Image (cartoon, grey):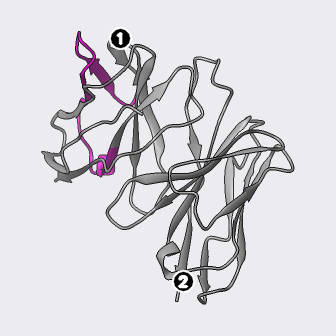
Amino acid sequence: NAGVTQTPKFRVLKTGQSMTLLCAQDMNHEYMYWYRQDPGMGLRLIHYSVGEGTTAKGEVPDGYNVSRLKKQNFLLGLESAAPSQTSVYFCATTEQGNRMNTEAFFGQGTRLTVV
Amino acid sequence: DAKTTQPNSMESNEEEPVHLPCNHSTISGTDYIHWYRQLPSQGPEYVIHGLTSNVNNRMASLAIAEDRKSSTLILHRATLRDAAVYYCILRDLYNFNKFYFGSGTKLNVKP
């Protein structure tokens, strides 16, 4: 049982390049989230999804796009990477919120550097 | 969205209790109080959560003020492995799909 798996773990991009980060979960959770964490700061919500085929914006969505074509996968895309997007990206999942167990499970993170 | 305020850092001695405070003066009646921690170079992990009553689990205890405007995470016997950043988060029962992390409290445990 892998839980939440993020791919890749590290990546260096040149300004203007594009890439996609993959988050895969095997817990059958409905809700998935993408966060970014800058040095010395807490996590900020980029986008989230409440189910297959749905996505919504979080706190800092500009410069990112997401897709949830399959329930188990949540993709985060950078169409034209900028140095300001250098960060550690975390994916998280939760069960449906009408359950008392609302623990979130996080992946190990993707460290992205844009030069 | 209701916000939380935590001290930037705290220090504790190994095997002593640690009390990590959190202020959330704008908490609403449907906000649950959650605590997560992040060990170095890892993703956050769940610690505990509660609504009104104090809560205990194998990792920690959560003490919630009667007016719910503040809470305290209690680690009963700190170990070196407990050195992490601890986040206090409010999650709305009806907007459970969004929860925001502040900057947290960095806990340093001295041997």
Q: In the rendered image of this protein, does residue A73 appear above or below residue B54?
A: below
Q: Where is the N terminus of chain A found, in terms of image quarters?
A: top right
> Foreground residue, B41 or A92?
A92
Q: Which residues are magenta?
A: B59-86
Of helix, strand and loop, which one carries label 1? loop
Whether B67 is among the magenta residues is: yes
Q: Give coordinates of residue B66: x percent, y percent.
A: 23, 9
Q: Is residue B82 magenta?
A: yes
Q: Amino acid at mark 2?
A: Val
Q: Position of residue A52 (x, y in %)?
A: 82, 41
Same chain for labels 2 and 1? Say yes or no: no
Q: Residue at x 49, y 24 (%)?
A: B92
Q: Tell how many labels.
A: 2
- Residue B77 appears at what percent x and percent y? 23, 34
Which of A94/B80 is in front? A94
User: To which chain does the residue with label 1 belong?
Assistant: B
Near-viewer residue (B6 or A25): B6
Residue at the image point whose x is 41% and y is 65% from the top: A38
Relative image position of residue B21 (x, y in whole percent) = 20, 33
Three-letter residue code for mark 1? Thr
- Judging by the rendered image, the residue that carries numbered circle 1 is B52
> In terms of secondary structure, where does tag 2 sit?
strand
How far separated are the C-alphas under marks 2 and 1? 44 Å
Q: Is residue B108 above or below residue A88?
A: above
Binning the other alpha carbons within 10 Å of mark 2 as few (below 14), some (14 to 19) or many (20 upward) gives some
Q: Residue at x 48, y 43 (%)?
A: B45
Dot 1, how many residues are within 10 Å of its Cα: few (below 14), some (14-19), or many (20+)?
some
Look at mark 2 in the image and give the residue it sits on: A114
Of the residues tagged 2 and 1, which is closer to the observer? 2
Q: Is residue A16 above or below residue A65?
A: below
Parent chain of label 2: A
